[in-house]
Amino acid sequence: MVGNEVTGYGPAGVSQSASEGSARDLIFARIRAAGEIARVDIARDLGISPATVTTLTAAMMNEGLIEETHDTPNNGKARGRPRVSLRLCADAHVVAGLKLGDKVTSLVILDFQGRILAESFMRTRLDPADPDALIYHVRATLTDGLNKAGLVMEDLSAIGIGVPGFVDASRGVVHWCPLLPERNVAVGPALTAALGRPVFIDNDVNLLAMAELWFGVGRTMRDFLVVTIEQGVGMGIVINNRLYRGTRGRGVEFGHMKIQPEGALCRCGQRGCLEAYVADYALLREAGTALPHAPDNPSERLEQLFAEAKAGNMAARSIFRRAARQFSIGLANICNIFDPELVILSGEQMRYDYLYSGDVQAEMAANSLDLGGEPVEFRVHKWEDQLWAKGAGAYALDRLSDQIMARGSVDA
């Protein structure tokens, strides 16, 4: 929904100190997270002198990044000087976030306060024979969303895009994506050149984790994981308020954890991956043993397989039970490695309760280290296209903010 309330976005409620960044960076992040906050509160929260806060916020106001807002005390019923707070200027920058899916591409347009100005959903159409199909599709989706917001392409300061597969976010290179016919494609630079706006691209599950970190339950947590299951199995990792990608950008490929040497063939080309036992295509591969007269449509076939399992079809049940067991072992492994505060389960397959049933959680606990204390918290979040797109928007805001802060530091 489009809203007018300034609530802030980005990591919040987590202690920070000057050792974690420049004073300018920390002040900007504190204003962004709070939504609206007074200078004296910034100084107190960050342990920075009020004079420094005043000087640096004045510079940011001159740059058009932040503005003052006056709150009347006691809802305007009492006398007194209005409290002066600071907030980001909503119209300082506008960004777009897109999530490319196999069926639907979702988009959100966000202002600099993180509020949704418009959203759009378009059927994904990528002709593998047309090398420019991705550019045409992204442009069409952006144009639709911008028209709804009353904006044009030149109004965008940055564009974030999430895609399934292996992505080198630092270079904008997609090493492999099930939506693209070729490997090692410099998608980010190609879209930047074609659209005339900075385009930043990353794995879609990384950006879903970013959506939780910037707009969701992860705002107040230092360490958490997001695990998704749909056509593939993905994972996003947040450590110390930062998205973790690994040295080469492929450090979070939970779905390609090997659980069975020389096992089932995965769509990545290797064998024995977790994804090859849990993802949609893995379940559909075995559906014929339980559904001799299954419908041709994959989505309908998967729904029927689940309905048969619920109705007592033992062959269908065994397919889901094996997937659930492999999934529980994988979850136990990542919890033993990362010891997260929270694991968020998301994705289309979360509508199938076999992946988060009591049996799954019990088996995961049995395979996890028990050192006392509170167990890892699990939450199931409803799958929404908009949230994925909002994570891509958060990525655009993050990269844009880094550039703005770096530019300001040089100017200073």
Image (tube, rainbow, N blue to C red):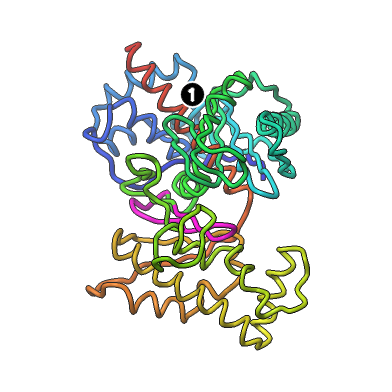
Q: Nearer the viewer, residue 323 or 23?
A: 323
Return the x and y of residue 131 as percentages of the image width and height: 66, 30
Q: Crowding near pointer 1: few (<14 within 10 Å), some, many (20+)?
A: some
The residue that disc 1 covers is 67
- The range drawn in magenta is 219-235
Q: Nearer the viewer, residue 121 or 50?
A: 121
Is any part of residue 176 visible from this angle?
yes
Q: Nearer the viewer, residue 27 or 318?
A: 318
Report the residue at 59% width, 82% height from top. Answer: 317
Report the residue at 45% width, 54% height from top. Answer: 235
Return the x and y of residue 187 as percentages of the image width and height: 55, 31
Asked whether, in this view, residue 111 is left or right of residue 65, the answer is right
Return the x and y of residue 8 as percentages of the image width and height: 48, 40
The quadrant the C terminus occupies is top left
Q: Is 222 above or below relative to 351?
A: above
Asked whether, in this view, residue 316 is left or right of residue 244, the answer is right
Q: Is residue 403 magenta?
A: no
